[in-house]
Image: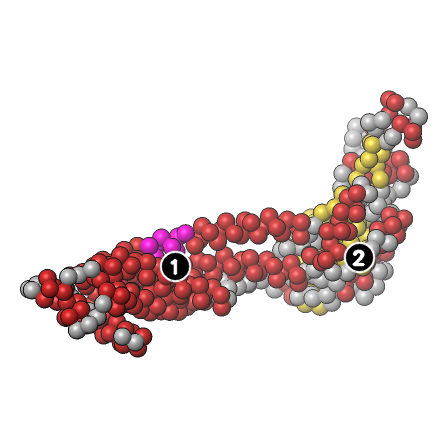
Amino acid sequence: MTVKDVLGMSFGNLWRMKTRSFLTISGVIIGIMALSSLLSFGVGMQQLASENFELLELFTSLQVLPHSVVRSEREDHTAADTTAPRVVMLNDSVMQDISRIPGVASVYPEDVFSARVECRGREANTSVYALLAQMGQSAPYSRMKKGRFFSSDSARETVIARELAVRLGFKQPDSILGQEIEVVTASMNPGAALPMFMSGGKVSPFREMRYKLTVCGLLKSDGLDEQPRQLIVPWITAQNMEKISFRSAFDILSMIRKGGKGYSSLTVRMKSYREFEAVRDTLEARGYRTFSIADQFEEMKKAFMIIDTMLGAVGMLALVVASLGIANTMIMSITERFREIGVMKSLGADDRHIQLLFLAESGVVGFIGGVVGLTFGWILTRIAAVVIMWWMEKQGQTGIDVFAMPWWLMLASVAFGVGVSLLAGALPSRRAAKVDPVHSLRHD
């Protein structure tokens, strides 16, 4: 028998048992639909994370944070001070030192301080980030949702996140562009410490300073940046603001011991991802603390693999149940076609031909169920994607497609359906091949 003959007889036999074939194929369809749609979600999440990492240049950037080192006995000439920490600030000399490391493309300073933002009678507390205007050429600031990055380091402009715009009462965040906001900072009140004690604490040692800025840009909500930046102001503009700016007690120690203040952090961008590990190791070898989401990407991939395995197991469970239906259908088919098998053997068909015929029927069930199940799975993911994006946009967030159906997943789904069906039909096909033709021809 040729392949054409085997396939023709397989389709013919399945067509004769329409209802049973339909129910058996339906089981495979449900299994493949569940498997492909669930794996599509896992693959989509991993693909989305990877694409956003590349888009935000997180694979080629990291942050350098202030750190403390232990003084050596040679520095202090006393053994008693060997454990006293010495705070190392991030200043211009450190920036120059880091910029000379091979593979480093650029180094930018960053300053962070707390403030209150007021606009049209609404107010919100947030962290203000001071950045250089040239960072507008790099991701994520090079692709604003609306507007532009500020024009210079001394501009009286600011870039705001859409979440902060919503907190300030703007139902349409885009409408905040061109609006004037007031940034309220806290600074030390000179000479207020003594009156505070004399007045029973009624005189505050702090005072509020107000600065008016114009919103020139609206940030996208990617959620994968190193830190959630709600309000960004030009570097020189921020330096001219009176404010109390520190993240931890070490920043205060820096100001006391060094008589000044370093940068809150430095953003280091590499020329390519190939230099990432070398630059990071060099910085850590010099005693600097580093942070980057890219460092966690390998762990994230392991987590995605576990999620994909769990999702795939749920889909496989439905497919295993369907395989039992295939096995049952094939066994029942042998009983009903007992005489037919005897006739084929008497006409010259050997055991191999009979086994191949029943395996082909199982494979056809798996192929049809796989293709139709994959189609239904794709339709299901498209419907789910539309619903999820609609819900996210309703919540004021940027809608994203969390499903992905790459070609390898489609081929694997159909191949897996055919493979499971062949395994389910292996035992019945061997049983059919062992049928005695003499006994089958006498069978009523």
Magenta-span inclusion, residue 329:
no
Left or right: where does residue 9 sit relative to residue 143?
Answer: left
Left or right: where does residue 438 sit relative to residue 148?
Answer: left
Magenta-span inclusion, residue 319:
yes
Q: Which residue is mark 1?
A: 34
Q: Which marked residue is nearer to the observer: mark 2 or mark 1?
A: 2
Assign the C terminus to one quadrant of the image.
Answer: bottom left
Disc 2 marks a residue whose amino acid type is Gly
Q: Which residue is mark 2?
A: 103
Dots 2, 1 in contact, CB < 8 A = no
**Residue 13's spot in the image, x, y percent?**
21, 71
What residue is rendered at 44% in x and 67% in y? Answer: 411
Between 3 and 234, the one lying in front of the other is 3
Residue 225, relative to residue 250: is it above or below? below
Left or right: where does residue 359 sit relative to residue 257?
Answer: left
What residue is rendered at 86% in x and 25% in y? Answer: 81
Residue 182 in sight from this viewpoint: no
Residue 304, relative to residue 253: is it above or below? below
Q: Write down the region rendered in magenta.
A: 313-320
Label 1 crowd bin: few (<14), some (14–19), many (20+), radius 10 Å: many
**Residue 310's spot in the image, x, y percent?**
45, 50
**Residue 263's spot in the image, x, y percent?**
82, 47
What residue is rendered at 83% in x and 28% in y? Answer: 84
**Residue 22's spot in the image, x, y percent?**
25, 67
Disc 1 marks a residue whose amino acid type is Ala
